[in-house]
Amino acid sequence: MLENKKAVIFDMDGTLVDSMWIWKEIDVRFLGKYGLTVPEGLNDALEGYSFHETAVYFKEHFPLPLTIEEIKSIWNEMAAKMYETEIPLKDGAKEFIAKLKEKNMSLGIATSNSRELAKVCLRSNGIIDAFDYICTSDEVPRRKPEPDVYLYTAEKLKTKPEEILVFEDIPYGLLAGKRAHMETCAVKDPYSERSMKEKLELADYYIESYYDILNGTYRVLKGRS
């Protein structure tokens, strides 16, 4: 999997950490303060949106007495506490990252989350110093599934796309990695189980945990060997 690779880029939520559940909970609590409920299909509508784009969506679709910046600030306050105290790394992630650093590989984050929350989460899990660059979708013109966030991270890591391995948990992210001409590894996450068929069609590899890589039991897809 790491043969001829000089860098690894991770998506964060659902890929590196078990965090996908908190956004539904934040939506419930946040909208509930204003007597509103979460409409069916909201998560699907927001898939791939950046943090800022999600705030714009809420401002446009819900009668909230808040500015976009105020929405983002409230979300950051709610989420920061949860990311700091309740969000663990995926099984084997810390050990895998240590192995990558032993190989002197460059590491990046390419996330649709905010930089503030990404830093809180990585710092609380003791791995922030392992990463050479943290890129958010707000830094690039187009969000996933377009390749911009991965290509920009590659530029910051001073590494060619074909020398990078991407880890992602949802089809949009895997497609972004493929469009950036990088090899991709799909990561198991309960919130994307319904998209498993599409994930396996897009990815070059598949893992249920990062121990699969350390133990050599990861799945090679598309006839790779």
Image (cartoon, rainbow, N blue to C red):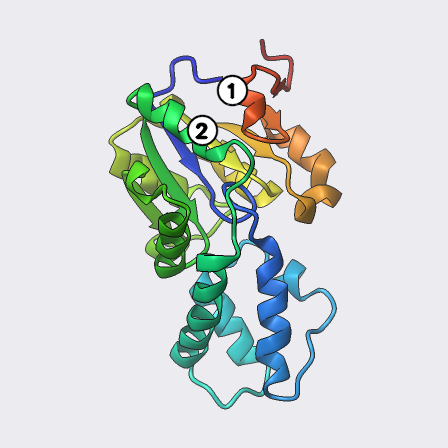
Query: Observer-nearest residue: 110 or 78?
Result: 78
* Residue 62 percent coordinates (x, y): 59, 82
The tag on residue 54 is: none
* Residue 44 percent coordinates (x, y): 66, 58
Number of numbered markers: 2
- Residue at (32, 26) in percent of width and height: 101
> Does 14 appear above or below 75?
above
> Does 49 appear above or below 212?
below
- Residue at (38, 42) in percent of width and height: 109
**Dots 1, 2 in contact, CB < 8 A:** yes
* Residue 92 percent coordinates (x, y): 52, 31
Looking at the rendered structure, the secondary structure element under dot 1 is: helix
For disc 1, the marked residue is: 214
Looking at the rendered structure, the secondary structure element under dot 2 is: helix
Picture quarter with the C terminus: top right
Apparent side of residue 4 relative to residue 45 in the rendered image (left or right): left
For disc 2, the marked residue is: 95
Label located before the other in sequence (1 or 2):
2
Q: Is residue 181 in view?
A: no
Which quadrant of the figure has residue 115? bottom left
- Residue at (33, 40) in percent of width and height: 153
